[in-house]
């Protein structure tokens, strides 16, 4: 089971995106967990993540998180896909980043 973790400013703004990603994962028959948290919770949830995605509003933290978790894939969510709450596109990007597609 893959564990995809999204971080944003407070954890709330990505809730809709996470729901749409989960819906798409169900359509694809994927066995994964997808959750969103505030950036302040990185140390709690990042260690168990297979993939870390950052909301565009916290992209400034990308380098620091990559340095803190060098064994993890860490990327920023595309601003357009995020703004459109396009769960399908974000999930497809996540799958590519994890080598699943």
Image (cartoon, rainbow, N blue to C red):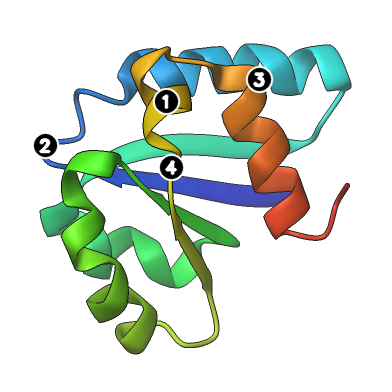
Residue at the image position 34 percent from the left and 36 percent from the top:
36
In this picture, residue 62 sits left or right of residue 96:
left
Query: In the rendering, at what x and y percent does residue 4 appear?
Result: 55, 47
Circle 1 packing at 10 Å, graded few (<14), some (14-19), many (20+), is few
Mark 3 lies on residue: 88
**Residue for badge 4:** 77
Residue located beneath label 1 in the image: 80
> How dense is the environment of label 3, judged by Cα within 10 Å: few (below 14), some, or many (20 and up)?
some
- The local crowd at label 2, few if under 14, some if 14 to 19, many if 20 or more residues have their Cα within 10 Å, is some
x 48%, y 14%: residue: 19
Kindly report the distance in space between the C-alpha atoms of the residues bearing marks 4 and 2: 16 Å
Q: Residue 95: x and y, percent?
A: 74, 46
Relative to 35, 86 lies left or right: right
Nearer the observer: mark 4 or 1; the answer is 1
Q: Which badge, 1 or 2, is on the more N-terminal residue?
A: 2
SS of the residue under disc 4: loop
Q: What separation in Å lies between label 3 and label 1 (alpha carbons)?
A: 13 Å
Locate residue 20 relative to residue 46 in the image: left or right.
Answer: right
Q: Are marks 1 and 2 in contact (CB under 8 Å)?
A: no
**Structural distance between the alpha carbons of marks 2 and 3:** 23 Å
Mark 1 to mark 2: distance in Å?
20 Å
Q: Marks 4 and 1: CB-CB under 8 Å?
A: no
**SS of the residue at dot 2?**
loop
Question: What kind of element bears circle 1?
Answer: helix
The residue that label 2 is drawn on is 10
Of callouts 2 and 3, which one flags the residue occurring earlier in the amino acid sequence? 2
Q: Residue, x 30% and y 41% (percent of image)?
A: 55
Q: Residue 15: x and y, percent?
A: 33, 20
Q: How many marks?
A: 4
Q: CA distance from mark 3 to mark 4?
A: 12 Å
Reading the chain from its start, which is encountered first: label 4 or label 2?
2
């Amino acid at each position: 089971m893959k564990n995809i973790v999204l971080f944003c400013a407070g954890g709330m703004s990505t809730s809709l995106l996470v729901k749409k990603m989960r819906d798409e994962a169900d359509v694809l028959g994927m066995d994964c967990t997808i959750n969103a948290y505030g950036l302040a919770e990185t140390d709690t949830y990042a260690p168990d993540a297979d993939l870390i995605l950052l909301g565009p509003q916290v992209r400034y933290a990308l380098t620091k998180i990559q340095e803190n978790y060098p064994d993890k894939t860490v990327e920023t969510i595309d601003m357009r896909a995020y703004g459109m709450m396009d769960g399908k596109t974000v999930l497809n990007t996540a799958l590519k980043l994890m080598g699943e597609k």
